[in-house]
Image (tube, rainbow, N blue to C red):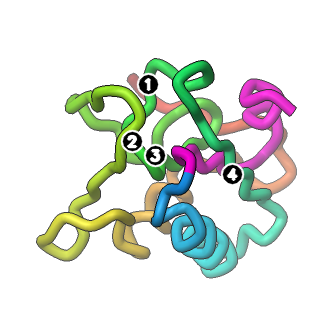
Amino acid sequence: MSLREDEARVAVTLLVIPHCPHAEPAAALVRAALDEIGRQEVDVITHVVDADSTPSSFGGSPTFVVAGADLFPTSVGTAGLSCRLYANEGASAGLPAAADLREALTRSLPAPGVEGGASRPE
C-alpha cells in the first residue's frame, strides 16, 4: 500500500526512518492517545521512509501525519533522513508530550464516521 493510499483512510500515519529508536514508542504513544480520546477506530500505520520515498515535508523521524498534514509542523527543515526532536515538558525529546499529541489528534481527525482527514487551515 502506498503512502497516498494510507492517507485516504481515517488513520494516523507514522513516518519513521529505518531503525528509528523511537518508532515503537511512537506507535504505542499514538495508539494510547487515540484510545484516550475515544478514537479506537482510527488506524495507526507505520511507514518507513528511505531516500527514495521521503515526502518533501518530512520533519524527521518520527513524524505524525493525519490527512497528509504533519501534526507538529515546523519551519525548521531536516536534511535527509534524520531523527526529530519535540519540545516535551521544557526539554527536547524524541517524542511529543502525550497531552500535546492528544490535542493535535483531537484537532486534526475528522469526526467519527467521516472518511478522510480534517482540513487544516493554512
Q: Which mark is residue 96?
A: none
Q: Quadrant of residue 33?
A: bottom right
- Figure check: 10 above or below 68: below
Q: Earlier in the sequence, mark 1 or mark 3?
A: 1
Q: Secondary structure at mark 4?
A: strand
Marks 2 and 3: in contact by CB < 8 Å? no
| Kind of residue at disc 2 | Gly
* Position in image of residue 23 (x %, y %): 55, 61
> Which residue in the structure is indicated by mark 1?
57
> Which residue in the structure is indicated by mark 3?
71
- Whether the magenta-drawn stretch holds residue 9 is answered as yes
Which span is picked out in magenta? 1-18
Q: Judge by depth and name the residue closer to the eye, 45 or 8.
A: 45
Q: Residue at x 57, y 31 (%)?
A: 50
| Kind of residue at disc 1 | Ser
* Position in image of residue 44 (x %, y %): 72, 57
Q: Earlier in the sequence, mark 3 or mark 4?
A: 4
> Which residue in the structure is indicated by mark 4?
46
| Kind of residue at disc 4 | Thr
Tell me the CA gap for discs 4 and 1: 16 Å
Q: Residue at x 49, y 56 (%)?
A: 20
Q: Which mark is residue 60?
A: 2
Tell me the CA gap for discs 3 and 2: 12 Å
